[in-house]
Image (cartoon, grey):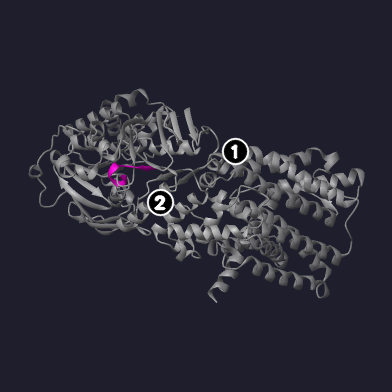
Amino acid sequence: MAEGAQLEVKGLTKRFGGLVAVKEMSFAVRAGEILGLIGPNGSGKSTVMKLIMGIERPDAGSVRIGGIEVAGSPSHKIARLGAGIVFQHSRPLHRQTVLENIKLALLPDKLTRLFVDPETDARARAIAERVGLSKVLDRRPGTLPFADLRKIEIAKAIARDPKVLLIDEPFAGLTSTETTAFSDLICELRDDGRAVLLVDHNVKSVSRLVDRVLAMYVGERIAEGTADEVMRDETVRRVYLGGDIVTAARPESSFRDRTTPFLEVDNVSVQYGKAQALQGVSIHVHAGEFVSVVGLNGAGKTTLFNAISGMLPYTGDIRREGSSLRGLTAATIARNGIVQSPEGRELFVDMTVRENLDLGGQHLPDAEREQQIASLFDLFPILRERQKQAAGTLSGGEQQMLTIARALMMKPKLLILDEPTLGLAPVILEQISKALERLRQSSAITVILGEQNVTFALPHADRVYVLEHARIVWEGAPAAFAAGAGAAYL
Amino acid sequence: MGSLSTSRVLLIALGVIVLAAFLPLGVSGYILGLLTIAYYFGVFAMAWDLLFGFAGEVNFGPTFLIGTGAYTAGILDNLYQPPIWICLAAGAFAAVAGGVVLALPALRVRGPYFGLTTLVAVLMLQNFIVVDASLTGGEIGLTVPDVITISDTKNYEIALWFMAVSGAILFSLARSPVGLILQASGQDAVQAGALGFNVTKHKLAAFVISAFFSGLAGGMLVFYLGSASVGTLVDITVGVQIIIAAVLGGRRTILGAVLGAVFLIAMSEALRPIGDLANFVVFAMALVVVLLFPSGFFGLLTRTKEGG
């Protein structure tokens, strides 16, 4: 393989139960090189990173750091051989100062070190200076802005002087100025002669930095090359943009409730601590309409859906058939017919398929419940076979079908589907896709579908919204998506 | 409390200890006796806080370690009457050995299972003591032929200095680099591992240290009381009191645990006139403190200092 590769991965494979999360991945990163590992949510890129770092154990394959085989070793050993990781979420010690947090990373793994040697302090200060934290050395992490918390993570990772540096979603949650500063820092680290692996959702966000890009989809490599080459790649375009999509959109004028749409989200903003999760978002959905909200992971889709479901505080207004939903509990909103099929599925894993469905239809009279279950078994025949099986033992695709079916047991007027395709194989997507199409044609149900998988989101949609960095940046017909919003999405 | 430097906290603590050292001049032997027990409980609670507050592991079975140390020391004295320090050393060693045997498999399981494992260990020890009555004295308890001294004042001083030294060691350890790694392991084991720290090794070390002080203090308590019994040293409720003392004093503070232990024993004594209701009132007060001031007494003290 590549001459002088600091990180060398060969035939790396990881299964979670029946799901193959990573399948025979091979790549190498040389000293002084940045490789971007990209893929949509659920493509397995984060698992690759965890396998390299020893946080998960690979089922097969080899990982070499500086030529030494580390596959299957515990993560502290891999770290000592020269691998470092910058986690996406910062998790500093909150009772310690920034300086102490950096010092922690400089400590040896010894039980006999009872006193900090004075050199450690100087080194910690030098690292803080380098990442731009010297002004806040004595502050606690809790009092710092988000960008500084990310800098602490970088500081901790470089404190161990890693030969191989893995960085998970380097720019998530940063402003454009902060992103520039962060990019410069990452380039400096490369110029020190480190091998850097950047993991992110799309090429666009890392194209300025990377020397090469490797694209993944459902656990497998789909393309490799320069950022431009990968962006031009047919398979990549199909995964991200959906290629040639047959759409069946009904024009907005065909819905009867034009003056007061069934659901109106009016200038809604949500703040999570310091991070702005939604900013002035306005969307509307007509009764019977199928609307897709497209956006990458972290764009704010789930936050939007949780706001509609009354699960978190927001500013602005959300109205159903003209009357505000503010002040109603999540339970009331759901009982009145706005039902969410959550991203995390949240099945009762120890209960059977049948019991999960019965719970969803708890409020229905017996006869009606039976009838509803029967019709859902027609929609998802596999669930009929799996009736007596515990939900936790189903495959990912079957669990997703059960999640949707359980939501439908509540006989919703509006069904919110949050990322139903997450981590599923194409063949399963097709089954779910067909079920949605039947649902759309055979009932008066209104659907909001949140997706990053455009191939899946566009064919069903009457209208599409694109959510990016907490804002709606595009609205239009699915046929116009590739031309109108595709470039920004890739 | 991070705002108070290690040396300043130790200085304040030293002042309190010097004051406490003069107590025998002014108070009755009865009160000295109570404080003697409170100081040993303080060590139990501090040792527990090292595990929970720093390593992040909830040990529901502090009395497994204490009981192992206490009964080993007591039984050895009963059988062979070696010098007391040999009994104590054997007790501390047995607690450490028992702790390792318990912790090695228990640290492999995650979440609530570690706590459950430690809880079951207490029940097993308790049953062993009751069943093997010829050796352990069973439910009646074990009487040891020797005591360290019969002087109230001497016993008080021994307990005070033992607590002071244990506290100084545990506190310094908690604030040392090892303590920092331990906190990181407790809060986020994945990240600690990725920074190159062997999380299991550090947690096991914390368990060993906690076991050493628990076992040693348990043994010393036996040679103060002249007896060991399940009800005073091993029962689950004793363990719960130790946990309450540590939380009440302020978790992750080590020294706060002593305040909590003294408070619990002093209140039970002060409320003795109201009979059986006393324990109820003490626990109710503990509940209020934990709910309203989750950082405990020590947190309250240092917060007012920060404010000023």
Residue A345 spot, x, y in % from top left: 36, 38
SS assignment at label 2? helix
Asked if one can make out residue A263 in the rendered structure from this viewpoint, the answer is no
Which chain letter matches label 2?
A
Q: Are marks 2 and 1 in contact (CB under 8 Å)?
A: no
- Residue B260 lies, with reference to residue A157, above or below; the image says below
Q: Which residue is mark 1?
A: B108
Q: Which residue is mark 2?
A: A188
In the rendered structure, the answer to whether residue A265 lies left or right of residue B33 reads left
The residue positioned farthest toward the front in the image shown = A3
Residue at point 41%, 48% (across, down): A191
Residue density around tag 1, few if under 14, some if 14–19, many if 20 or more, within 10 Å: few
Q: Is residue A202 magenta?
A: yes
Q: Nearer the viewer, mark 2 or mark 1?
A: 2
> Residue A453's image quarter?
top left
Structural distance between the alpha carbons of marks 2 and 1: 40 Å
Residue A426 spot, x, y in % from top left: 29, 28
Q: B210 or B234: which is nearer to us?
A: B210
Q: B232 or A141: which is nearer to us?
A: A141
Q: Write down the region rendered in magenta.
A: A197-206
In the rendered structure, the answer to whether residue A182 lies left or right of residue A456 reads right
Which chain letter matches label 1?
B
Q: Is residue B14 magenta?
A: no
